[in-house]
């Protein structure tokens, strides 16, 4: 009977976790995009969506209360009933004089203890149903993790380690939805002493090549050779700055050790003098005094404009000294002058870079040795920007 009354609790508790997550996500989105919401005058619509999430949560909670009430009624009655049953059985024997009075008490205690051991489902059904809902979510998470691991092991792109170059060999990238070929049979070698501009009108194709370099594009086939992930850095169009101190933001990348949080922080921290020199070179050293030093914890995405956020990401690149850096449309956040400053600093530190930009962007071509042009239909062309021809080591096109 307890299972019949309480069966809906498993689904309701599972839904409760979902609805709580939806409400938190809605409120977090509003907080993170408050300025954009105010500018677009969409407060009313988003408030209604948040109220709907709250209403769904309250309605589901009321259903849980109703089911718990029914289960509670049965459980309370059951617990009282099991105390009466021994007396009803032993009382006639006592009246007939077949047993002593103390036997009634002994029987009641023994029956209560024995039946209590078998009544765990009745007494703990509410806790069991909540545990089942959590267990189901953890099971789904474990299955998703195993699926992701299997997909990674069966990745269509074969990666190999290259210490001094980036090699795309027979790389074909497709749209994950339509299957349209974005880049067809790309075969190019980029040595460490070469600075390359990747451009084309198809933004999806550029993005696919950018993300496939670190294995974030599944609709692909071919081979990519590159240094390890801790030796390359990607600068995305929209910067990501987690809450923390400036010193933490400018740490070197974690290694690929199984337990990176057990590493010695001194291995990834950068000396303060080096940090200040780099920030001064980027002309953002006043930021340190303005925000109380390198060890003042801040929510940087909330207090810094987009260009200054990107400059902090660039400072981390300069301090990390990667073997290669890949830049996704840096001019959209920084403008041509700051991009030139950044590229000059990369050149001074002998850090090779590959920049992904649209055809319309105004870039100083003197900063590049070669251009990879992505054309319609997935065709491409790799050519020099100088009067001299690229050497065979720099320009390798395999049809």
Image (cartoon, rainbow, N blue to C red):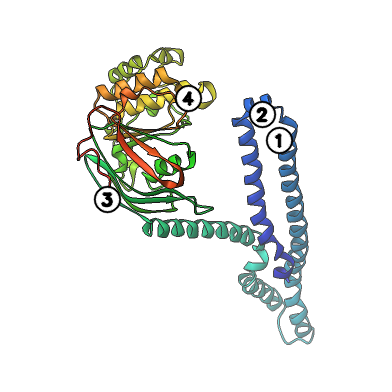
- Which residue is disc 3 drawn over? 160
Query: Which element carries disc 3, helix, strand or loop?
Result: strand
The reply to whether residue 367 is in sight is yes
- Which residue is disc 2 drawn over? 37
Q: Which numbered mark, 2 or 4, is in the foreground of this view?
A: 4
- Do callouts 1 and 2 mark residues in contact (Cβ within 8 Å)? yes
The residues bearing labels 1 and 2 have C-alpha atoms spaced at a distance of 8 Å
The residues bearing labels 2 and 4 have C-alpha atoms spaced at a distance of 21 Å
- Which residue is disc 1 drawn over? 46
Nearest to N terminus: mark 2 or mark 3: 2
Disc on res. 333: 4
x, y percentage for residue 284?
40, 15
- Do callouts 2 and 4 mark residues in contact (Cβ within 8 Å)? no
Q: Nearer the viewer, residue 361 or 318?
A: 361
Residue at x 67% of width, y 60% of height: 11
x, y percentage for residue 49?
72, 40
């Amino acid at each position: 009977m307890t299972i019949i009354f309480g069966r809906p609790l498993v689904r309701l508790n599972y839904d409760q976790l979902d609805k709580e997550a939806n409400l938190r996500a809605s409120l977090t989105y509003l907080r993170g995009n408050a300025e954009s919401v105010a500018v677009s005058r969409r407060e009313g619509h988003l408030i209604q969506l948040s109220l709907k999430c709250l209403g769904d949560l309250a309605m589901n909670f009321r259903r849980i209360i109703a089911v718990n009430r029914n289960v509670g009624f049965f459980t309370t009655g059951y617990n009282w009933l099991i105390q009466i049953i021994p007396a009803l059985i032993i009382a006639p024997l006592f009246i007939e004089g077949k047993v002593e009075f103390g036997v009634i008490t002994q029987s009641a205690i023994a029956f209560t203890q024995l039946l209590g051991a078998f009544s765990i489902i009745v007494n703990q059904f509410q806790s069991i149903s909540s545990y089942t809902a959590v267990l189901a979510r953890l099971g789904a998470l474990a299955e998703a993790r195993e699926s992701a691991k299997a997909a990674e092991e069966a990745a269509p792109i074969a990666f190999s380690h290259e210490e001094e170059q980036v090699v795309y060999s027979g790389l074909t990238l497709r749209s994950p939805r339509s299957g349209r070929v974005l880049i067809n049979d790309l075969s190019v070698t980029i040595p460490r002493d070469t600075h390359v501009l990747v451009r084309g009108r198809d933004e999806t194709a550029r993005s696919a090549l950018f993300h496939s370099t670190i294995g974030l594009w599944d609709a692909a086939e071919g081979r990519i050779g590159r240094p390890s992930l801790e030796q390359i850095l990607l600068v995305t169009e929209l910067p990501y700055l987690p809450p923390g101190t400036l010193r933490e933001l400018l740490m070197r990348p974690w290694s690929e050790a199984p337990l990176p949080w057990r590493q010695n922080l001194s291995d990834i921290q950068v000396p303060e003098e080096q940090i200040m020199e780099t920030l001064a070179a980027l002309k953002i050293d006043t930021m340190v005094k303005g925000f109380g030093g390198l060890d003042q914890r801040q929510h940087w995405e909330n207090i810094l404009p987009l260009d200054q956020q990107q400059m902090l990401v660039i400072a981390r690149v300069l301090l990390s000294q990667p073997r290669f850096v890949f830049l996704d449309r840096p001019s959209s956040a920084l403008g041509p002058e700051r991009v030139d400053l950044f590229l000059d600093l990369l050149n001074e530190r002998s850090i090779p870079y590959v920049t992904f930009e649209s055809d319309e962007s105004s870039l100083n071509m003197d900063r590049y040795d070669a251009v990879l042009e992505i054309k319609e239909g997935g065709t491409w062309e790799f050519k020099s920007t100088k009067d001299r021809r690229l050497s065979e080591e720099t320009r390798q096109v395999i049809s």
